[in-house]
Amino acid sequence: MPAVPSPTPWYVTASSLNLRRCPGVTCGRIGVLRQGDVVLRLREDGEWVEVRVVRTGQVGWVASEFLEEQPEAGPERPTASGSSAPGPPVPRPAPPGGPVKEEFLE
């Protein structure tokens, strides 16, 4: 198993990712990571990466396909200066449940 030279921060891209005792789907689950969680890559074993979870300090294995070097950007939203910046999703109002008032019909 090749060692990663120094722990590198990576970001979880899956909405839910199992943290396992060893590299493989048959290994027991020791935790669950969420999208955006930051982990430090410690070493690799094929398609699996041993990581340390920054939030908890827990060490375990995850499938490498669910890690990215950059955090996923949220939807664009205007800033005070008028430029766009990533941000949290903006909730949309629920559609009206009743008939549309005549004043809104064209």
Image (spheres, helix red, strand yellow):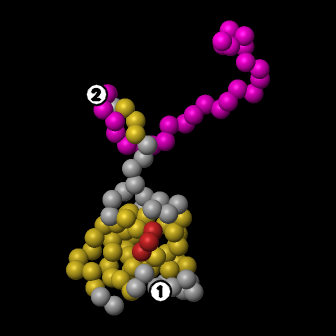
Mark 2 and mark 1 lie on one chain; the one further toward the N terminus is 1
The image quadrant where one finds the N terminus is bottom left
Q: Please name the predominant secondary structure of the magenta segment in the image.
A: loop
Residue that label 2 marks: 81
| Of the pair 26 and 53, the residue shown nearer to us | 26
Which residue in the rendered view is the most extreme toward the front?
Answer: 106
> Does the image show residue 34?
no
Q: At 40% across and 39% down in the image, what residue appears?
A: 76
Task: Reply yes or no: does residue 84 show up in magenta.
Answer: yes
Type of amino acid under label 2: Ser
Q: In the visual, does 8 lie left or right of 67? A: left
Q: Is residue 20 above or below residue 1?
A: above
- Is residue 1 located in the magenta-colored stretch of the structure? no
Residue under pointer 1: 22
| SS for dot 2 | loop
Q: Secondary structure at mark 1?
A: loop
Mark 1, other Cα within 10 Å: few <14 / some 14–19 / many ≥20: some
Between the C-alphas of marks 2 and 1, the distance is: 48 Å
Q: Would you place residue 57 above or below residue 43 in this image?
A: above
Q: Quadrant of residue 95?
A: top right
| Extreme residue toward the left, this view | 5
x%, y% of residue 74? 42, 47
* Image coordinates for residue 78, horizontal then vertical, percent: 37, 32
Q: Which residues are magenta?
A: 80-106
Q: Residue at (35%, 83%) from the top-left corner? A: 44
Which amino acid, mark 1?
A: Cys
